[in-house]
Image: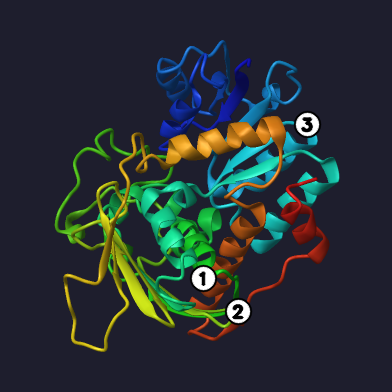
Amino acid sequence: MEDLRIGVIGLGLRTSLALSAHRPGRGSVVAALCDSDPAVLKRQSERFDADILTEDYRELLDRSDLDAIIVMTPDDTHERVATDCLRAGKAVYLEKPLHITVEGCDNILRTAKETGTRLYVGHNMRHMGVVRTMRDIIRKGVIGEPKTVWVRHFVSYGGDYYFKDWHADRTRTTGLLLQKAAHDLDVVHWLAGGYTTRVNAFGDLMLYGDLPRRAPDTPRPENWLKEFEWPPARRGDLNHVVDVEDVSVMNMRLDNGVIAAYQQCHFSPDYVRNYTVIGTEGRLENFGDGPGDTVKVWNTGPSGYRDDCDIAYRVPAAAGSHGGADTGIIAEFNRFVREGGATDTSPVSARMSVAAGYMATMSLRDGGTPYDVPPLDPELAAYFERGQR
């Protein structure tokens, strides 16, 4: 079997994903690289043996020697870049979130359907061992039927990863309740077996709004991901625009009656996710999302809190970035490019996570007013549910 030849557009923080796709002789090879910054393109090209380098992604679209494109450009460019690739007949891997608006998401899905070109959205948490372990526990009926899901996300590096570049500008992301939370909202939907129909949210720019910012067009300091400052109020060199919230809380009602909640803070001292799912016969909970972590289940009672739980499930070990998820998601993408059909990730699910985060952000900026999530066109939903056939 010959390797798929893949082009990569955008060589920022997620270049680790492209490295997972560069497996010469083992299924896929990164044959083309594109980044609008020539210095970044030169530096990252040294990690690959790609024979095609360009600063303009459009130069990749008519090439007959590329089988697929991985798009990892900033969120606000996803609609333009992805639709161009789809219209050129290139199978697309689009890094999450699908887009920063519901309309943009729907335009991408519509283009994929109209052109018949394969679209894959990179919600790699569906390939994390801890998420798959929680899903398997629920499917086995160990906690009964899920009724409520709670997620707390402590983001210790938030000031560095999200407030020192374009992520801090709502015109580029809508907000971190969409950009950062899209993964978690997708997992909530996957575990609960439904999609959000109504939201309300509160949040604020509590800490980073008053810290020193760089002048426009000033690059980030070279050590921006090597020297993390503490406490958070000491941070400087923030993006020249900072207008997204650094604390947010969100409530959701799903179409199957499940009620869920999501909380996010970007100035906590530690980085960790905490999932809780409560069903009709028990509760599961986890702290951490790496191999070797534990998902605990309590399904006897009633009682006071018991740290030893009733059943403990060890998350299986896995190699590679994001707890092995990047390797898993690239394997699924390669299979999808070759064969098509159903995948664990879903463009419809990706759209619904963006829609929930987008409407929650609208609620947050409207004093917590509840908002309904706009449904997806049934014809589009049916097309993707058929595996894009």
Which residue is at a point 45% across and 59% down the rendered structure image? 136
Question: In what element is the residue under mark 3?
Answer: loop
Q: Is residue 324 above or below residue 255?
A: above
Tag of residue 256: 2
Q: How many marks?
A: 3
Q: Position of residue 332 (x, y in %)?
A: 57, 38
Check disc 1 and report the residue beneath it: 192
Between 166 and 321, which is closer to the camera in this rendering? 321
Between 256 and 212, which is closer to the camera in this rendering? 256
Q: Is residue 42 above or below residue 179?
A: above
Q: Position of residue 171 (x, y in %)?
A: 55, 57
Dot 2 crowding, Cα within 10 Å, few <14, some 14–19, many 20+? few
Q: Which quarter of the image is occupied by the C terminus?
A: top right
Which residue is at a point 76% across and 47% down the rendered structure image? 388
Q: Position of residue 210 (x, y in %)?
A: 29, 64
Question: In what element is the residue under mark 1?
Answer: helix
Q: Are marks 2 and 1 in contact (CB under 8 Å)?
A: yes
Which residue is at a point 55% across and 39% down the rendered structure image? 73
Could you tell which of marks 2 and 1 lies nearer the N-terminus?
1
Q: Is residue 368 above or below residue 386?
A: below
Residue, far bottom = 302
Check disc 3 and report the residue beneath it: 88
Label 1 vs label 3, nearer the camera: 1
Dot 1 crowding, Cα within 10 Å, few <14, some 14–19, many 20+? many
Q: Which quarter of the image is occupied by the N terminus?
A: top right
Looking at the image, residue 60 sits to the left or right of residue 235; the answer is: right
Looking at the image, residue 243 sits to the left or right of residue 104; the answer is: left
Could you tell which of marks 1 and 3 lies nearer the N-terminus?
3
Q: Amino acid at mark 3?
A: Ala
